Image (spheres, rainbow, N blue to C red):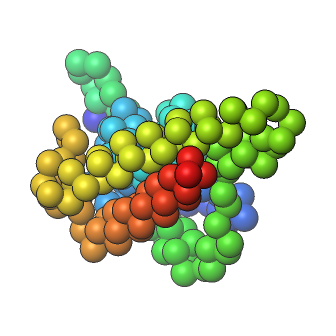
């Protein structure tokens, strides 16, 4: 494998967005991987609570390599895949970011946005919206409960549910139950 990567830069958290830390975090947690691996890992972990364009998982590793936060190895035969690995500078950037306050959560909920403007449309839209949102949250809750019972999605292993994964899963359960209660109340 050929190894490429810039010498470590002085990249700081200010010029790294959440997608950079998703890449650094996934590679730190799961080990070296390709952009495709990153997409698979994200879908089975942070994708449940953080939305982002999956295309970022193809561009971001190249940028982080240029910054010296990742090392890239390209296979010399076969598909010549690019395999990325976190450098010591990348691990330090991730640890620095983890040590800083997260701030108030950003909530972007299309259902709530439509509910806010519901008076601008016919009254039956609220019931339709509530029924739709209720079904979506019930389905997500069922998926989370299945994971709790050991029925893991393809590609997820029991090891993926480390302490932090279990905590985020518990938060997901609480979040979905709160949404189900809210939208059920609107349906009356």
Q: Residue at 78% across / 30% down in the picture?
A: 122
- Residue 4 placed where, x, y %? 45, 41
Nearer to me, 101 or 150: 150
Residue 31, by quadrant, is: bottom left
Place of residue 36 in the rendered image (x, y in percent of width and height, measured from the top left): 36, 32
Apparent side of residue 100 relative to residue 132 in the rendered image (left or right)? right
- Looking at the image, residue 110 lies above or below residue 149: above
Residue at the location (78% across, 41% down)? 118
Q: Is residue 72 visible?
A: no
Residue drawn where x is 56% and y is 51% of the image: 188
Q: Residue furthest front?
A: 188
Q: Quarter of the image containing the N terminus?
A: top left
In the rendered image, residue 50, in percent from the top left (x then y), is placed at 52, 52
Residue 100: image quadrant is: bottom right
Residue 14 drawn at (x, y percent): 72, 64
Above or below: residue 135 compared with residue 185: above
Front residue (pair 140, 23): 140
**Compared to 175, does 102 lie above or below?**
below
Q: In this view of the protein, can residue 159 be seen by the observer?
A: yes
Residue at x 24% of width, y 68% of height: 162
> Looking at this view, is 81 or 170 the one in front?
170
């Amino acid at each position: 494998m050929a190894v490429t990567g810039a010498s470590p830069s002085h990249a700081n958290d200010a010029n790294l967005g959440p997608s950079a830390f998703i890449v650094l975090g996934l590679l730190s947690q799961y080990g070296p991987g390709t952009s495709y691996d990153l997409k698979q890992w994200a879908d089975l972990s942070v994708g449940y609570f953080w939305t982002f364009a999956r295309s970022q998982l193809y561009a971001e590793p190249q940028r982080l390599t240029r910054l010296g936060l990742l090392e890239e190895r390209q296979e010399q035969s076969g598909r010549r895949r690019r395999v990325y690995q976190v450098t010591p500078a990348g691990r330090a950037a991730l640890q620095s970011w983890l040590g800083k306050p997260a701030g108030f959560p950003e909530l972007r909920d299309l259902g709530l946005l439509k509910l806010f403007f519901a008076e601008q449309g016919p009254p039956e839209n609220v019931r339709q919206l509530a029924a739709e949102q209720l079904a979506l949250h019930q389905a997500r809750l069922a998926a989370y409960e299945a994971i709790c019972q050991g029925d893991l999605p393809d590609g997820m292993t029991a090891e993926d549910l480390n302490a932090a994964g279990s905590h985020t899963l518990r938060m997901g359960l609480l979040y979905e139950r709160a949404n189900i209660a809210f939208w059920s109340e609107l349906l009356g």
